[in-house]
Image (cartoon, rainbow, N blue to C red):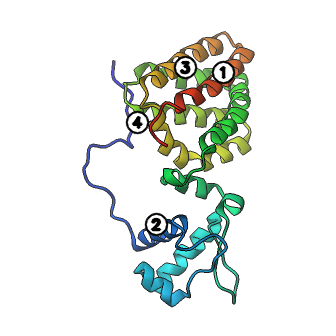
Amino acid sequence: MTTYQFAEETDSPWKPIQKPAEIAETRLISAILEGRFPINSHLPGERELAEILGVTRPTLREVLQRLARDGWLEIQHGKPTRVCDYWEEGRLGVLNTLSEHPEELPENFIPDLLNVRLAMAPMYTTLAVSNASGKVLEILNESQNLNNSPHNFAHFDWRLQHQMTILGGNPVFVLILNGFKDLFLNLAPHYFSNPAARKHSMQYYENLTRAVQDNNVDEARQLTEDVMHESLAFWKQTDFL
């Protein structure tokens, strides 16, 4: 039996070379998070900021527009660029970025995030099992080939959740979950670094498989709700925060 592998995992020691815009974006976000550009302050003028970040002005404009789309900045023609209150004005891209800065996360961030997943997952699981139980089983059967790698557990769990939103037939669930992809894949390996969490999820996959085989939609929903509740206890055992 072969182990479940993913194309994303590689043994290459080389990391992709960052483009100037990516470097400038990282520097600017760090400056915001560290308070050098506080919430509701205004950024320096374009020429000065480009020099601070070490990029050309066209590259800076690209970065500013991208950060404005995510809710880090507010750009108004003829006015200085304002640093937004990203917790109140930000979008999903802010969450993805903040997952790479655990020191900036508030105390209840992970419980709040898990509560969002708890609200969604039982619903799209119910729809997926009702609409396409055979295809759900095909995905669940792949869990039998999982090796003990936190990386592989994280990617399999993402694939299962993502495919169930698609199979459920409600495109809103798909779009919402897609917005959490980077965040999920940043956090999940930390969660699955706990052997007990991997064992717990494997038991969930086995129990869900039996419920789907029996076409027991209510059991599938309850299993999913229970595992989402229990995941909070396992998260508290991680060393992420």
CA distance separating discs 3 and 1: 13 Å
Q: Which of marks 3 and 2 is nearer the N terminus?
A: 2
- Find residue 40 and name its label: none
Q: Distance between the residues labelled 1 and 2?
A: 38 Å
Is label 1 in contact with label 2 (beta carbons under 8 Å)? Answer: no
Give the structural element (helix, strand or loop) at label 3.
helix
Q: What residue type is labelled 4?
A: His
Q: Give the tally of numbered discs.
A: 4
Query: Is the residue marked by circle 2 packed among few (<14), some (14-19), or many (20+) residues within 10 Å?
Result: some
Question: Which quarter of the rendering shows the N terminus?
Answer: top left
- Comes first in the chain, label 4 or label 3: 4
- Residue 110 is left or right of residue 241, and the answer is right
Report the residue marked by disc 1.
226
Q: Earlier in the sequence, mark 4 or mark 2?
A: 2
Label 2 sits on residue: 26
Residue type, numbered disc 1: Asp
Mark 4 neighbour density, 10 Å: few (under 14) some (14–19) many (20 or more): many
Calculate the distance from the C-alpha at mark 4 to the C-alpha at mark 3: 17 Å
First in residue order: circle 3 vs circle 1: 3
For the residues labelled 4 and 1, the Cα–Cα distance comes to 23 Å
Q: In this view, does 129 lie to the left or right of 10?
A: right
Q: In this view, does 52 lie above or below 108?
A: below
Q: Which mark is residue 151?
A: 4
Check whether the beta carbons of the residues at disc 4 and disc 2 lie within 8 A of each other: no
Instruction: Identify the amino acid type marked 3.
Output: Tyr
**Residue type at numbered disc 2:** Thr
The residue wearing badge 3 is 205
For discs 4 and 1, the disc positioned in front in the rendered view: 1
